Image (tube, grey):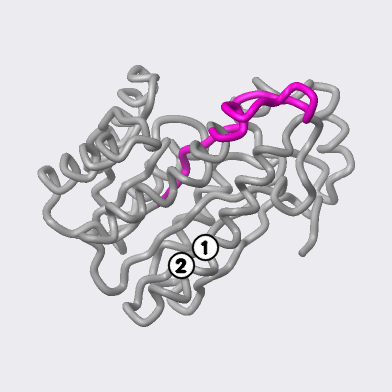
Amino acid sequence: MNELKNKVAIVTGGARDIGRFCSLKLAEKGASVCINYYDNEDQAKETLKLIEEGGGKAIIVQGDMTKPEDVKKVVDECRKSFGEQIHYLANVAGGLVGRKTMSEIDLDFWNFVLKLNLTSAFIVTKEVLQYMPEGGAIVNFSSQAARDGGGPGAFAYATAKGGILTYTKGLAKELGPKNIRVNCVSPGMINTTFHDTFTKPEVREKVASSTPLRREGQAAEVADLVVYLLSDQASFVTGASVEINGGTYFV
């Protein structure tokens, strides 16, 4: 369980749902985890408490990952607590924001969705790479929406997540000679507050029943995949987008 001992990880959006489980599972394997959160300090404190009760090490740092100054603050606090090097980065932060059709959407909304889901990953990664040694790894978050266009009113989100696919592949080529791996995960219907907020229960039931595994995925299952991709067990995997959707969509 200490295979990641002496490693340091940053998880953006690491206080709840998939981000929380990424933080918990990295800590369980011995990593020191810097948990970024945006607006829910109580959830961040609960995640920190769970890690510390399990004997792990972590800190929580508030910050908006679309703002370079906040990103720098998170990275600086991480280095202050756990040393100069940052070995792993999970860019979990993002969100649908709202469902809007082309007739409803305006430029400000479009720009915000892309900034939240795509540009934020660029800002965080650029800051972290200054301190990432050889053997480091990055996992970005795409979505099944990047493959199929998303549900009603989600085309801006799907576009941003499609950008993550290309961003991941391009960065993997650039950083490969430095022995830094870059991958992404593309979740389908996962049981999180994302779908509690934006997806009707009857739609969730329909999707789950039509999935070959006949259920929604769980946040912990996605986190297991993220930890694998960050770890040395995936040492020859880079530039990949791993689908985790129970068989709903095949690439």
Q: Is residue 98 magenta?
A: yes
Judged left or right of residue 135, residue 219 is right
Label 1 sits on a secondary structure element that is helix
Magenta highlight: main SS? loop
Kindly identify the residue that appears in the image at 72 percent across and 34 percent down: 154
Q: Are marks 2 and 1 in contact (CB under 8 Å)?
A: yes
The alpha-carbon separation of the residues under discs 2 and 1 comes to 5 Å
Kindly identify the residue that appears in the image at 72 percent across and 50 percent down: 245
Looking at the rendered structure, which numbered label has been put on residue 182?
A: none
Amino acid at circle 1: Thr
Q: Quadrant of residue 220?
A: top right
Judged left or right of residue 138, residue 153 is right
**For the magenta stretch, what is the residue range?**
90-111
Label 2 sits on a secondary structure element that is helix
Q: Position of residue 151 (x, y in %)?
A: 79, 36
Which residue was labeled with disc 1?
Answer: 168
Quadrant occupied by the N terminus = bottom left
Q: Position of residue 81 (x, y in %)?
A: 12, 43
Looking at the rendered structure, which numbered label has been put on residue 171?
A: 2
Q: Is residue 214 above or below residue 228?
A: above
Quadrant occupied by the C terminus = bottom right
